[in-house]
């Protein structure tokens, strides 16, 4: 399946306890035999389910830049800001700037909140 066709949308859940992630995929090839005349498969994921998360999904769900998504992933995997900045070959001041933008886009205020939010994606694949 072509990667560019994947679409991710975030919704508030009915109980407002956690957001839901909707993923649409086109029905292609042999899947037509299973799903008949359908054009899309829609899956929903409760973000409170444990999961691991790819940079692409972090980027799409939260509208992050590629660097912001890589930094968020490093932090969610337990790296300190200093460790993450060294691993990404960026200065600590640049990392702090990206982190502030990540906080704004994810509506978090501290690294612990960001880690908790991203930990909800465990199992999505890396």
Image (cartoon, rainbow, N blue to C red):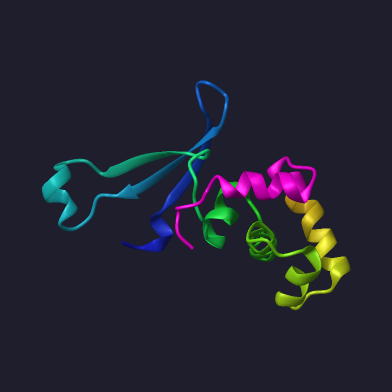
Question: In percent of the image, x 59 and y 56: which residue is there?
Answer: 59
In the image, residue 65 lies at what x, y percent? Answer: 66, 60
Looking at the image, residue 42 sits to the left or right of residue 117; the answer is left
Which residue is most to the left? 33
Would residue 22 be visible to someone looking at this image?
Answer: yes
Question: In percent of the image, x 18 and y 58: which residue is there?
Answer: 29
**Does 11 lie within the magenta span?**
no
Looking at the image, residue 64 sits to the left or right of residue 94; the answer is left
Would residue 105 be visible to someone looking at this image?
Answer: no
What's drawn in magenta, residue-wise?
103-126
Looking at the image, residue 106 sits to the left or right of residue 100; the answer is left
Number of marks present in the image shown: 0
Q: Quadrant of residue 69?
A: bottom right
Which residue is most to the right? 93
Decide: is 62 above or below 126. above
In the image, residue 64 lies at what x, y percent? Answer: 66, 55
In the image, residue 44 lies at what x, y percent? Answer: 40, 38
Nearest the viewer among 58 and 87 is: 87
Question: In percent of the image, x 14 and y 46: which residue is there?
Answer: 34
**Does 123 lie within the magenta span?**
yes
Decide: is 4 above or below 82. above
The N terminus lies in which quarter of the figure? bottom left
Question: In percent of the image, x 65 and y 45: which residue is there?
Answer: 116
Nearest the viewer among 52 and 61 is: 52
Nearest the viewer among 21 and 120 is: 120
In the image, residue 48 lies at what x, y percent? Answer: 52, 38
Looking at the image, residue 12 sits to the left or right of residue 92; the answer is left
Decide: is 96 above or below 106. below
């Amino acid at each position: 399946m072509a990667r560019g066709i994947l679409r991710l949308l975030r919704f508030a859940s009915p109980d407002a306890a956690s957001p839901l992630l909707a993923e649409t995929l086109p029905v292609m090839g042999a899947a037509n035999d299973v799903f008949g005349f359908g054009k899309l498969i829609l899956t929903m994921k409760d973000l409170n389910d444990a999961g691991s998360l790819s940079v692409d999904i972090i980027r799409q769900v939260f509208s992050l830049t590629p660097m912001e998504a890589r930094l968020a992933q490093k932090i969610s995997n337990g790296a300190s800001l200093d460790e993450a900045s060294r691993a990404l070959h960026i200065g600590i001041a640049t990392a702090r700037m990206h982190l502030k933008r990540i906080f704004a886009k994810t509506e978090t205020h501290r690294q612990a909140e960001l880690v908790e939010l991203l930990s909800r994606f465990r199992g999505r694949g890396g």
